[in-house]
């Protein structure tokens, strides 16, 4: 069996009575873009800081090319790091900031000049070596921080919420640049974010963190289509959850009785065992269609609100005895001409595209 390029093995981190990371294990391939995704306090940043050597684990090990890193100080691990705050030296020019890691490593001046020039070209800041950080935009400063982290060609680059301080348009622009740089350099990237859209846009694979553990690892498509837990189902993409009674379950599929009495058969079960009597039915807003109510719909309800969102229309429908359900229809959908707040509609969906989680 081939040795993983980077391996996280049973990492645990305890602060007094609080366990921040619980038995996290993960293998990362060389050149992979792996994102740690989760809410604040889920353990993703702590795991990253243990990788960087800024914190020691309470248990477990980190191996790079089969060698443990735990006894190696952070400054000798040869791992690049980009933080949320740019952490540039304000008294140094752009070129001097980027050159700093090479000067610490006592590289020859000619090599430093060549690498700084190449790194700035990579992040599209050619010719700005003499500019001071205070005279640059937030996006430009983050590009400088990225160039500084890459200039000494580390085998692994760690990025902790690097774009959270930027506005949406600039964040999307830098996301594109990070993806391009990853493709051009082939550097292995571990990226921390709480933004699911950012994770989906950038990553080869995503590790979803919850309460100090990894709930699921997979591509964005795998996590969206086959969520292993209710948490992952709610965190990746937009979701509705409808509480239902289990009429029948074979462990892989279930028949569910919905509020109002309709029974839906053949709903896939995810991450659960058979035997429960209650279930949460997950419906994606874009997988629901609306028809005028005929009394025979899977779920009938009253239209409460209609919101124009550009390329789609958000419709909020309130079924009897259940929480309102979000529906997203494409702009120009035939049903929109007859929709208005107060109208009664049926929500149609394919049972195979829904998901059920036992309560």
Image (cartoon, rainbow, N blue to C red):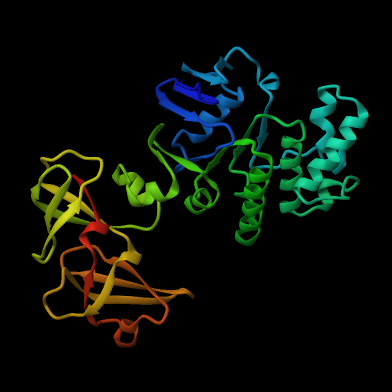
Q: Is residue 274 left or right of residue 90?
A: left
Q: Quadrant of residue 187?
A: top right
The residue at the point 32 percent across, 47 percent down is 226
Residue at x 43% of width, y 26% of height: 25
Location of residue 42 in the rendering, given as x and y in whole percent from the top left corner: 44, 36
In depth, the one of 250 and 128 nearer the eye is 250
Count of all numbered marks drawn on residues in the image: 0
Res 74 → quadrant: top right
- For the C terminus, which image quadrant? top left
The answer to which quarter of the image holds residue 71 is: top right
Q: Is residue 350 above or below residue 141?
A: below
Q: Residue furthest bottom?
A: 337
Side of 94 relative to 75 (left or right): right
Position of 320 with respect to 339 (left or right) is left
Q: Is residue 354 above or below residue 231?
A: below
- Give the vertical position of 347 relative to 130 (above or below): below
Horizontally, residue 128 falls left or right of residue 251, namely right
**In the orientation shown, which residue stands out farthest toward the front?**
1
- Asked if residue 20 can be seen in this view, the reply is no
Q: Residue at point 45% right, 43% down?
A: 39
Residue 66: % across, % down = 54, 17
* Percent x, y of residue 113: 90, 36
Q: Hey, which residue is sitting farthest top in the picture? A: 71
The answer to whether residue 333 of the structure is visible from this angle is yes
Residue 243 placed where, x, y %?
Answer: 19, 55
- For the point 23% across and 57% down, the residue is 352
Where's the N terminus, which quadrant?
top left
């Amino acid at each position: 069996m081939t040795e993983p390029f980077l391996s996280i093995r049973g990492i645990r981190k305890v602060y007094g009575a609080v366990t921040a990371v619980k038995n996290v294990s993960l293998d990362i391939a060389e050149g992979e873009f792996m994102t740690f995704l989760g809410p604040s306090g889920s353990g993703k940043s702590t795991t990253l800081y243990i990788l960087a050597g800024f914190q020691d684990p309470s248990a477990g090990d980190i191996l790079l090319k089969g060698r443990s890193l735990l006894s190696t100080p952070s400054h000798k691990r040869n791992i690049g790091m980009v933080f949320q705050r740019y952490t540039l030296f304000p008294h140094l020019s752009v070129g001097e900031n980027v050159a700093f890691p090479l000067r610490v490593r006592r590289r020859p001046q000619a090599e430093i000049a060549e690498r700084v020039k190449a790194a700035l070209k990579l992040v599209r800041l050619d010719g700005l070596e003499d500019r001071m950080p205070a005279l640059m935009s937030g996006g430009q400063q983050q590009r400088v921080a990225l160039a500084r982290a890459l200039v000494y060609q580390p085998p692994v680059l760690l990025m902790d919420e690097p774009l959270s301080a930027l506005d949406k348009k600039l964040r999307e622009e830098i996301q594109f640049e990070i993806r391009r740089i990853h493709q051009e350099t082939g550097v292995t990237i571990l990226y921390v974010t709480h933004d699911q859209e950012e994770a989906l846009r950038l990553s080869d694979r995503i590790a979803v963190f919850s309460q100090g553990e990894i709930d699921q690892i997979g591509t964005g498509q795998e996590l969206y289509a086959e969520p292993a837990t209710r948490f992952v189902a709610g965190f990746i993409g937009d979701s509705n959850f409808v509480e239902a009674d289990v009429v029948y379950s074979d462990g892989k599929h279930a028949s569910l009785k919905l509020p109002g009495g309709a029974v839906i058969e053949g709903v896939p079960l995810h991450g659960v065992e058979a035997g429960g009597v209650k279930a949460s039915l997950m419906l994606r807003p874009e997988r629901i269609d609306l028809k005028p109510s005929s009394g025979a719909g899977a779920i009938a309800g009253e239209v409460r609100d209609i919101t124009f969102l550009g390329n789609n229309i958000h419709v909020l429908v309130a079924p009897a005895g259940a929480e309102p359900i979000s529906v997203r229809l494409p702009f120009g959908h035939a049903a929109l001409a007859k929709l208005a707040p107060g109208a009664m509609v049926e929500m149609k969906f394919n049972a195979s595209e829904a998901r059920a989680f036992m309560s």
